[in-house]
Every structure is written in structure tokens, then in C-alpha cells.
């Protein structure tokens, strides 16, 4: 693995970057809109192929566990429309 960059503040979180938390690669989704303003929470989703499958929620005090993996970009999963699949069968 490459050199990891620690995330010192939650303002550097980006949805297209890949982050390592406890040796598992995650993608940042969004900050929780229902969290209190003085204690924001952030939602991460593991990348495909990782052993963890559940989403991870961290608050501003646990954000020091997050490391940026330079050179990796997270891609959003593609959505397959039912019409496209049905047309491919014929």
C-alpha cells in the first residue's frame, strides 16, 4: 500500500476519494443531515471486494482514524435499467 495521508479535518472529505479506516477501504458518502450541528457525523461505505459490508458512521472525534489513499479514485456503481436488460435478451 502507498503512503497514507491522515485526514486532520472533516473539510477535506471528498466523495471521489478512497479512504482507509482500520485497514479497510471506504468511500465517503455524505455527512449526516440529521446530526446535531455541534457534533457532525459522516457516512462511509466499503468498496466492493472488502470483507466488511456494512456502512460506517464516524463523528468528528473519530475522524482521526481516516487516512486518504492517494492515487485511488472511487467510482459510483452503475445502475442497470430493466428496459435495457430486456432489450438485450431479444
Image (cartoon, grey):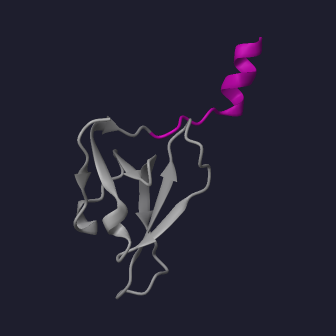
Q: In x, y percent, where is residue 36?
A: 43, 87
In this figure, what is the number of numbered marks?
A: 0
Q: Is residue 67 above or below residue 57?
A: above
Q: In x, y percent, where is residue 19?
A: 36, 50
Nearer-the-camera pick, 19 or 34: 19
Which residue is painted at 24% across and 66% down in the image? Answer: 11
Nearer-the-camera pick, 22 or 49: 22
Q: In x, y percent, where is residue 60?
A: 35, 76
User: Which image quarter is the C terminus in?
Assistant: top right
Q: Is residue 26 left or right of residue 13?
A: right
Q: Is residue 87 magenta?
A: yes
Q: Is residue 81 left or right of residue 64?
A: right
Which residue is painted at 49% across and 80% down in the image? Answer: 34
The residue range painted magenta reads 76-90
Q: Is residue 89 above or below residue 76?
A: above
Residue 33's image quarter?
Answer: bottom left
Which residue is painted at 30% across and 59% down in the image? Answer: 13
Which residue is painted at 66% across and 25% down in the image? Answer: 84
Residue extending furthest toward the top:
90
Q: In x, y percent, where is residue 67?
A: 31, 54
User: Which image quarter is the N terminus in?
Assistant: top left
Q: Is residue 67 magenta?
A: no
Amino acid at each position: 500500500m502507498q503512503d497514507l495521508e491522515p485526514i486532520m479535518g472533516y473539510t477535506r472529505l471528498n466523495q471521489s476519494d478512497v479512504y482507509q479506516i482500520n485497514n479497510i477501504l471506504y468511500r465517503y458518502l455524505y455527512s449526516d443531515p440529521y446530526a446535531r450541528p455541534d457534533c457532525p457525523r459522516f457516512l462511509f461505505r466499503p468498496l466492493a471486494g472488502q470483507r466488511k459490508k456494512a456502512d460506517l458512521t464516524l463523528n468528528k472525534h473519530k475522524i482521526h482514524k481516516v487516512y486518504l489513499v492517494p492515487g485511488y479514485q472511487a467510482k459510483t456503481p452503475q445502475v442497470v435499467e430493466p428496459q435495457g436488460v430486456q432489450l438485450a435478451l431479444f
